[in-house]
Image (cartoon, rainbow, N blue to C red):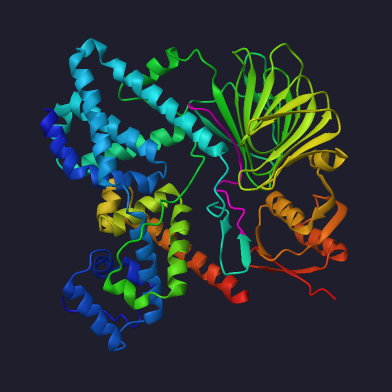
Amino acid sequence: MASAKDYKKYTFTDFLSDEDFVQSIVSPTEESRTKWKTLIDAGEVNIDEYTDAVLILMGWKDTQDAPTDADLDALWNRIETTIISSEEKATSRKHLWVRAAAVTSAIAAAIAIVLMLLPREQGTGQNTLNIAPGYLVRTMEQSDDKVVITTDKMEMYLEGSNPDISYDPNGVLSVNNIVAESLSETEGAAETDWSEEMLTSESAEQLCNIIVPYGKTASLTLSDGSFLRINAGTTVRFPSSFLTDKRKIYVDGEIYLEVVHDNRPFIVQAKEMEVLVKGTCFDVCSYDNDDYSNVVLVNGRVDVSYKGSNITLTPRQGFFATAEGTSVKVVDTDFYTSWINGIYKFKNESIEKVLVKLARFYNVTLVLPQEESGITCYGSLELKNDLSTILTGLMQIASFNFAVKDGAYFIQWNEKK
Amino acid sequence: MKDVLQGIYNEYAKDLFRYGLSICQDKSIVEDAIQDLFLYLHNHYATFAKAEDTKKYLFASLRNRVFKAMKKKPVFFNIPPATASTVETAEEKMIIDERTRREKVMVKEMLSNLSPRQREVIYLRFSEQMSYKEIASFLSIEPQSAQNLFGRAIDKLRSKLLLMRNINDYL
């Protein structure tokens, strides 16, 4: 193919929009290789833009390694089985598989929760990106910037930075005291009649998720009257009404919880930790991408089970689990629950932990030196100020510097004198 | 009948799978959608047989199913496929050094952070090598919109790449 194109003037976008170029990288031939090599050697190509374009295509190609042949075979077996069973059962029973499909996806959803609660392996966390040896970038990135409520039938995006969500005893949802009965189901006209099937087969608890992005918080009243404050960057999963003999919710992140007493136990599951409650106020902090979890009890009684061991907490006690082990300490609960009033209090806390919490709250990217600062601090910050003001204040008590570049906050420890 | 479907499966399953994964990174959703699609083909073969363009029909049906399933089920986790040690082609060797190796990993991560529609259009351009006109007719949008969608996705990748480099330089 004659190249009348002037690759010297090509930009990154031009390259990636050029079908010849894309094809020669995605499925190279001897001919295309020679062509590009000759062009490059002759200086006929804008090499910086070319290199970046190649990089993007290579990265793209790497994502195309799935599915494997084994994946494909397994999937065909699944399909074959369902086809055979649908052939065996005459047309009147056609719905049966459809129902089976609904069950399959329910199982998939359950697996998703389990995955969500499993701690990520060290180093594979999405939010930790090793940029250069010696530095750690925490990108506090989430796809949406609104609080979201989802069920398997709908999703709802909420405005405002601290929406008040509540379920009445019948499981009816209100947001900021407005009943959301007009909530349209996003289910469109289905091509099969399975949506009806699914509705009628649903006598079980309807699970809801509330996803609070970084930079937001939310309040939630459950159908039993229990009250939650949900901190930034947290997902909570719970039934719209509790229909079984226990009340169970799942948490990835941080919540403060006031449980209403009734004869059914209340269980909070977070990562590998399970907290059993009987009428209590407490704070659970367990982010999947943090290597620590803790439960702090304000009043009442809770049982914490963690990796097979059981611990009972009495008021003002905290349970702390880190990579090194677990401990129970008497704490000033205010330090753990002050965030519900928009104040962040901390005592003998490492400056890194404080900064990560702030980055989460303000939804910014934080770049920390990987080397530990060894600085611990004590203080109380009002989270309504802007982050730069807060950091400037923090610099008074802890010896570090920060710079903002392209929306990312870069931290540097000062040399110790 | 089953053999006919198996033939279709053998020919298109890999592309369907990849296309599905470009929209939705949750493999179980894509698998369920493909299974559902083939059962639908089995039960409504006549409709399918009338389709002019088999691949287009399959892609469009899968697309509807995947988007529908994603609406119902929030995707909690977003783990890019494990880095396979792929054999490097001559083009790669030309540019490969430690930095590019690292940046390639970054690109994969950036791709997984694009929106489903952006990843989809990238897939259609890069892997299916469709023209904007073909993409436009497939997605029922204007060719200009297809081009914009692709352009924005590419710009986003570029600016992220530059940002990451800036961070590196700053450090």
Residue A250: which quarter of the image? top right
Q: Is residue A358 visible?
A: yes
Measuring from the top left, give residue A194's x and y in whole percent. Answer: 35, 20
Measuring from the top left, give residue A328's x and y in whole percent. Answer: 79, 37
Q: Is residue B122 above or below residue B61?
A: below
Q: Is residue A272 above or below residue A349?
A: above
Taking the spot 20% from the left edge, 44% from the top edge, the residue there is B12
In the image: residue B76, left or right of residue A383: left
In the image: residue A395, left or right of residue A174: right
Q: Is residue B154 above or below residue A165?
A: below
Q: Is residue A255 above or below residue A180?
A: below
Measuring from the top left, give residue A135's x and y in whole percent. Answer: 63, 67
A140 inside magenta stretch: yes
In the rendered image, which quarter contains the N terminus of chain B?
top left
Residue A331: which quarter of the image? top right
Nearer the observer, B29 or A124? A124
A226 inside magenta stretch: no
Taking the spot 72% from the left edge, 51% from the top edge, the residue there is A357
Give the extent of the magenta segment: A138-153
Magenta stretch, main secondary structure, is: loop
Across the whole image, how many numbered discs are drawn on residues? 0
In the rendered image, which quarter contains the C terminus of chain B?
bottom right
Taking the spot 47% from the left edge, 57% from the top edge, the residue there is B109
